[in-house]
Amino acid sequence: MNKLRLMGTAALVVIGIVHLNLYAREHYDQIPTIGPLFLLDVILAWLTAIAIVALRSAWIRRITAGMGALLCIGTFAGYMVTLVHPLFGFEEPYVSYSGGVAMAAELAGAACLGLYALGADRRVAGTPSRQVLQSGTSDSYTEPDASSSSSSPSPSPIDAGTRNDISVSPMGSGGGTQDAQDK
């Protein structure tokens, strides 16, 4: 599984755990409007985490990850508002331990899921951005054997693009994407 996807999913699970703890054990269920919103946050975070892991289609996973990033941003923004101004009549007096854990998970989740949704993890599999090729083959450039008695110096990968007998493959040629390997 992709690292951004895994970390973003873990952040959603943590967000759900923190909010469920506050709802059930810290009596946030008694707070009008805020209590049901905490429960809704738990449900949405966990459903989104399950969907990101369970969905088979890569593009639907990316859309779901984008929705998860927006959930993280919205939850973080709501918490920030309650620290400085009442939201639905509720105001946090300070950042609690649970609040700190939730904020960290929300920021991490927003970053990881946002980057995953935007495709920041995509790269051409097995092909560096500038692969030096020898004589048009798909094998990467290798130094000649030391036993060969050629009088010309061996080309280095740095100046290989200036030699006529070596070609540089264009960016994005060959291979599949990370998503293709992700399935």
Image (cartoon, helix red, strand yellow):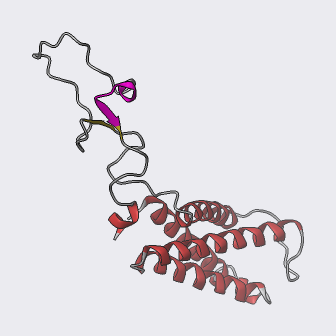
Q: Residue at the spot x=47%, y=57% of the render? A: 121
Report the front residue among 4 and 176.
176
Report the front residue among 91 and 110.
110
**How many labels, in total?**
0
- Decide if residue 82 is on the left or right side of residue 57: right
The quadrant in which the C terminus is found is bottom left
Q: For the view shown, which residue lies furthest in the left direction?
A: 147
Write the start and end of the magenta stretch as one range.
160-167
Q: Is residue 148 above or below residue 26?
A: above
Q: Answer whether residue 64 is magenta in the image.
A: no
- Decide if residue 22 is on the left or right side of residue 91: left
Q: Is residue 44 above or below residue 78?
A: below
Q: Residue at the spot x=41%, y=80% of the render? A: 54
Q: Position of residue 43 (x, y in %)?
A: 58, 85
The quadrant in which the N terminus is found is bottom left
Q: Is residue 154 above or below residue 118?
A: above
Q: Position of residue 22 (x, y in %)?
A: 66, 77
- Decide if residue 162 is on the left or right side of residue 118: left
Quadrant housing residue 21: bottom right
Report the front residue among 112 and 101.
112
Q: Is residue 114 above or below residue 162?
A: below
